[in-house]
Amino acid sequence: MRTLDEKLDHASEAVRHRVGEAPTRPAEAVSRQARTGRIVRGTLGVALLAGLLTVSSLLLAGRDDTLVATGGDETPTTIPFTSDQNPALSPEESAQVDEWLANGEPGLAALYDPTAIIINRTTDEWRMRAGLYQGQACFEFELVSSGPHGGAADCRTPSEWKVPGILDVDSQSPVYSRPIGGTQDDAEVTAYGPASIYGLVGPEVTAVELIYASGERHVLQPFGSEAGLGFSAFALNYDPEDTGMVVTVAALDATNRQTGHADAIVCAGFLASQLGDMATADPMTAAYCSSPEH
Amino acid sequence: MAIDLEAEAMVRNGPSFQQDFESFYARERRAVMGLAYVLSGSRSGAEDLAQEAFVAAYRRWEQVSTYDDPGAWIRRVVANKAMSWLRRRGAEARALLRIGEGRHTIAPLDDESELVWQEVRHLPARQAQVVALRYLDGQDVVDIARILGCTENTVRTHLRRGRETLARRLADKESP
């Protein structure tokens, strides 16, 4: 019988052997991913709109955290907030958050998140945080489990910031989030299967109207603005009968009209409630936010 | 947040930058991928995790390349990313249902090795990282401490506890 060291050595050698056999991606793949992610800003949304990307390519693209913003041109889209305006972060703290994120330690970064908004769902609670990272609005979603290890313990589990544009998958559901930047007053979100539409709106927005493809409209109030960041969140469970329905998210002002404010909707996306439902949606199960030309 | 894409591209396309990075990539790629694999348990995701880490390095290469040991930095990044991946493994499995099984780039391990790494992944995250760095990557306690940003005593403690747990659990699995 092998000793523990022998078992670990054998298992290590097996891994080295398998990895050594695996096909090698050239270094150019890394540099291309790093470079093109920035350059293709603004075009990805259009590609998604056309349904040209498959799920697998979307998954790969979504992991490219250079896809931080969509826009109609090549200019990075940012929202008109800066860390200076974030009451929770000093410049030193912002720098520290940058460092943590760069080092793959988002949980530490999340500790500096100034807001925590709980969304009650039918059976679970989703904790949504909204914050800023490099001047851009970030989301993170975290399932507060009702299981035996749920509750406070899971609340403390670090989860990842969802920098707009990053496709990320948490322990329960895929989270597809794309920014639409701070330059428009409505957005389109395509949801496949039961989902929660969510997003952030600017401080002047008093209501959000979801306009379904069927013409049905639903107005809801953003919440959480008292949390101190100046923008608030909205979320609504949505269960389209057909897959691939487009929902227009419009920001309304105090007169219940579409605001026309430039920074009305910061970002929006959808959170699938059941991946099983998504699995039947082909070819594209993601949501996106439209780019400004819409 | 204005970014001068052209200027940045000029720097990154420079021969020195590229050669330097490519040399680093060639030197570290397999070790990083191996770590990603054993810590995430994902044959389909290990390559992507490794690439994510290298992309992070590439973007900060002007800074990372000045570190005493860029290899330690990228091991730390991939170890953290792999643990995040592990927390999301259920979703990954379901995602594979959609995108098919064709993305595996690493052949499966023999049963005994697979069992060992499964048990490593069941250890607390830091213990798993220490064990993987020690055995798979061949790092000593001093280097592991530097990679993970903790003290050597902490590494020794994690290693000891991890080994104790592994020995017990593997023995249990072997018991008839």
Image (spheres, coloured by chain):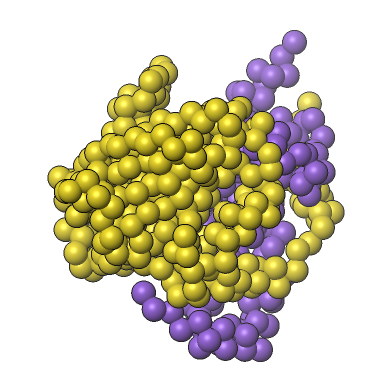
Chain colours: A yellow, B purple
Q: Quadrant of residue B41?
A: top right
| In this view, A161 is above or below A271 | below
Q: Who's the residue at 47% across and 65% down the image?
A: A293
**Outermost residue toward the top in this view:** B176
Q: In the current view of this chain or complex, which residue is farthest to the right?
A: A21
**In this picture, is A242 found above or below A185?**
above
- Residue, x 60% and y 55% (percent of image)? A48
Residue A168, relative to residue B124: is it above or below?
below
Q: At which x and y percent is residue A129?
A: 31, 44
In the rendered view, tell whether residue A204 sits above or below residue B15: above
The N terminus of chain A: image quadrant: top right
Is there any visible trace of residue A175 in the rendered image?
no
Which residue is painted at 62% across and 85% down in the image?
B13
Q: Nearer the viewer, residue B102 or A231?
A: A231
Which of the two residues, A42 or A227, is positioned nearer the viewer here?
Answer: A42
Q: Residue A62 versus residue A241: which sits nearer the camera?
A: A241
